Image (cartoon, rainbow, N blue to C red):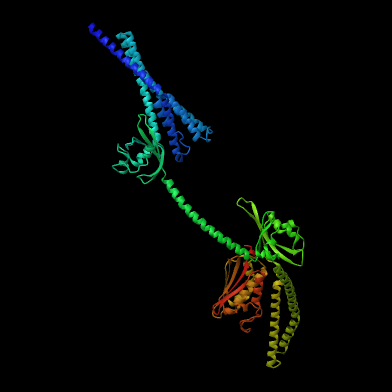
């Protein structure tokens, strides 16, 4: 038994020594390989950061400066897994420098926003953590190999089975510990890989890896949602349903040139993509293509619409330019043929443009003669106000406009210093301003109102003469009417006395003559009284003031009560407004119109009279409607004339002056009166009072 145990111990010891030597050799080889590839892993880290930077620049149009580290996290992870802590830290620092230079504000080196400082700190901490985890994984593997070597060497030196067992137990314990550490490192790496994939899955673009044999080792969620899952098929098989590669495949141009390649592609879904292809070598030495595609369908549509709008806008601009040119030509033609003068001057007072009318008004023979500075005109012209006050040059129209005043119909006398030429001009004008509100031109308009002013002066004198004549005529009518009353009353009184004393004592013919004389004297008295009332409409009218048309109508009906009751006339009304009027004359107006309606009633039916009012176009329109005998419409003007009658005096007594008084009253109030009528159907009289003189 002892021999067998010793043989077993020797065998175990031999195996342990062999194992330790193999592990020592492996550790030496590993250390040698690690030292030889030290610069390689740094180069790989730099290359991976460069690829990630190019990829991020490709996403610039989609993401802008948001999601700064979206491609840099994967780069740090790959560099750390491949090269350990030094390569991971190098990739982290390079990525931070690139992010600061390209995407963090301000442009170039330097960080401005606190949020950018925070994101940079998180990125550096994450990169350091990833590098440390990867380095721990590498060291765990190295320590595992070293531990095995150390255990073998210890067993070989001691040569005892007990030491070897203890060493084995210790080695197993350490291997177990290292295995647990490696499991944790592997889990952390798996977590980082999953996070990297999650980042790729949330990108608003597709990311796919393509092998030289057209297989798809990796595709993010965007790609699979758009084009489906490959399930081991080649790209041309499940994308296009082909059995062989496409004749011209832009993607694999990157493999031919080994340089990044950009192109546009219309996918099987009919949408447009902006493609970025990056060739790179995987950790196992195989060559792959990293392809990223941005959906630019909306952008292409927007560009097409923008191009269409641009063409349409260019057409509109050309059309508008033609219209403006035509309008400019028309405007020039209009200004050139205007009767009014138009002058343009700069803000320094230089008169630049004159239209022909302005040139002719000032007596200039040519435009060149008129193009002067304002102060130079004082050598040729003298300007004065209408009362003869001479204006200094700073009060001339152009000078006032240049100070910012707006002129409207300012009448000025213009006299040439040489000769007896003198005219009256009406000036207007304003400053013309640009889009920023700065004045750059002065526009002066002028009209020669000399003849108009002469005509106005003649008209004023004629009006004064007419007013004086009317006043004399009204005075004459009043005096004549008043002076005629006394002898007429004497004649009437004696004729009535003669009729009372001698009626029946003389023959019948004498009685008839006496009756004619009495009747003529009475009619003459009535005629004089009405003529006096007609003249007093203007001479003895009261001032216009707010007056109730309702009250005026009531006063008229009170004066007509006897006639209305005698003829059993029915008078109705609508609500009447308050107007600015002479209340007594308004009552006289209603009295004359209603009295006429009662007088000229139809013998076949009782008189029906209706008074109403409505507001139309800035005035009150009053209406007096009856159902009387009416008249031919052709006599409308005649009924408003003095002493004009349409019926015999015996059937319808009166002087024929009542409607003439109505017309004069309405005209004094600024309105007008008219009538519509039809024989046998009645008449409608309308008169107006302006609402600008109304108080409602």
Decide: is 193 above or below 645.
above
* Along the viewing direction, whichever of 322 and 491 lies nearer the viewer: 322
Q: Position of residue 511 (x, y in %)?
A: 69, 90
Residue 476 appears left or right of 178: right
How many numbered markers are drawn? 0
* Along the viewing direction, whichever of 256 and 214 lies nearer the viewer: 256
Name the residue at 25% across, 10% down: 8
* Along the viewing direction, whichever of 226 and 115 lies nearer the viewer: 226
Q: Position of residue 52 (x, y in %)?
A: 43, 34
Q: Is residue 129 visible?
A: no
Residue 528 appears left or right of 76: right
Q: Is residue 639 visible?
A: yes
Q: Quadrant of residue 144?
A: top left
Q: Position of residue 385 (x, y in %)?
A: 74, 62
Q: Position of residue 297 (x, y in %)?
A: 41, 46
Q: Quadrant of residue 495?
A: bottom right
């Amino acid at each position: 038994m002892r021999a067998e145990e010793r043989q077993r111990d020797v065998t175990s010891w031999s195996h342990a020594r062999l194992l330790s030597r193999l592990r020592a050799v492996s550790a030496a080889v590993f250390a040698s390989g690690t030292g030889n590839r030290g610069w390689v892993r740094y180069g790989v880290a730099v290359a991976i950061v460069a690829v990630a930077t190019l990829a991020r620049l490709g996403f610039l149009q989609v993401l802008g400066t948001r999601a700064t580290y979206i491609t840099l996290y994967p780069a740090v992870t790959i560099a750390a897994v491949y090269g350990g802590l030094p390569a991971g830290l190098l990739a982290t620092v390079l990525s931070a420098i690139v992010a600061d230079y390209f995407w963090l504000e301000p442009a170039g080196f330097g960080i401005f926003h606190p949020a950018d400082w925070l994101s940079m700190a998180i990125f550096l901490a994450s990169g350091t953590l990833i590098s440390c985890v990867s380095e721990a994984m590498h060291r765990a593997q190295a320590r595992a190999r070293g531990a095995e070597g150390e255990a073998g060497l210890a067993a070989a030196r001691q040569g005892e089975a007990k030491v070897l067992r203890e060493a084995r137990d210790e080695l197993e314990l350490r291997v177990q510990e290292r295995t647990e550490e490696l499991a944790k490192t592997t889990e952390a790496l798996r977590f980082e890989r999953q996070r990297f994939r999650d980042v790729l899955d949330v990108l608003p673009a597709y990311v796919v890896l393509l092998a030289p044999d057209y297989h798809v080792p990796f595709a993010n969620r965007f790609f699979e949602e758009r084009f489906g899952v490959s399930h081991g098929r080649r790209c041309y098989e499940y994308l296009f349903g082909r059995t062989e590669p496409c004749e011209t495949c832009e993607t694999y141009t990157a493999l031919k040139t080994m340089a990044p390649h950009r192109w546009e592609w219309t996918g099987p879904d009919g949408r447009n993509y902006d493609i970025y292809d990056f060739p790179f070598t995987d950790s196992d030495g195989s060559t792959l293509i990293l392809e990223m595609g941005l959906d630019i369908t909306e952008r292409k549509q927007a560009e097409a619409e923008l191009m269409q709008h641009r063409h349409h806008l260019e057409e509109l601009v050309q059309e508008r330019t033609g219209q403006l040119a035509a309008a400019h030509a028309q405007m020039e033609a209009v200004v050139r043929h205007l009767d009014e003068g138009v002058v343009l001057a700069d803000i320094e007072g230089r008169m630049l443009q004159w239209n022909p009318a302005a040139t002719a008004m000032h007596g200039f023979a040519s435009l060149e003669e008129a193009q002067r500075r304002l102060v130079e005109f004082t050598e040729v012209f003298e300007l004065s106000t209408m009362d003869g006050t001479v204006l200094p040059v700073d009060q001339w129209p152009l000078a006032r406009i240049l100070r910012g005043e707006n002129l409207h119909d300012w009448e000025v006398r213009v006299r040439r210093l040489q000769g007896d030429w003198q005219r009256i001009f009406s000036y207007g004008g304003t400053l013309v301003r640009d889009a920023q509100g700065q004045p750059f031109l002065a526009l002066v308009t002028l009209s020669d109102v000399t003849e108009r002013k002469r005509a106005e002066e003649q008209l004023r004198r004629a009006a004064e003469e007419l007013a004086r004549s009317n006043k004399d005529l009204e005075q004459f009518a009043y005096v004549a009417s008043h002076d005629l009353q006394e002898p007429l009353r004497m004649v009437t009184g004696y004729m009535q006395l003669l009729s009372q004393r001698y009626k029946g004592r003389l023959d019948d013919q004498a009685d008839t003559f006496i009756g004619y004389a009495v009747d003529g004297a009475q009619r003459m008295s009535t005629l004089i009284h009405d003529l006096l009332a007609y003249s007093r409409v203007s001479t003895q009218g009261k001032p216009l003031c707010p007056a109730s048309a309702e009250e005026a109508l009531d006063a008229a009906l009170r004066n007509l009560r006897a006639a209305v009751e005698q003829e059993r006339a029915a008078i109705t009304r609508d609500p009447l407004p308050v107007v600015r009027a002479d209340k007594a004359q308004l009552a006289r107006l209603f009295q004359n119109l209603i009295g006429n309606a009662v007088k000229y009633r139809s013998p076949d039916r009782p008189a029906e009279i209706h008074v109403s009012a409505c507001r139309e176009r800035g005035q009150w329109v009053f209406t007096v409607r009856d159902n009387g005998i009416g008249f031919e419409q052709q006599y409308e003007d005649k009924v408003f004339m003095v002493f004009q009658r349409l019926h015999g005096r015996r059937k319808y007594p009166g002087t024929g002056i009542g409607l003439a008084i109505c017309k004069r009253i309405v005209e004094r109030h600024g309105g007008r009166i008219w009538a519509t009528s039809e024989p046998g159907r009645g008449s409608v009289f309308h008169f107006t009072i302006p609402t600008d003189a109304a108080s409602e």
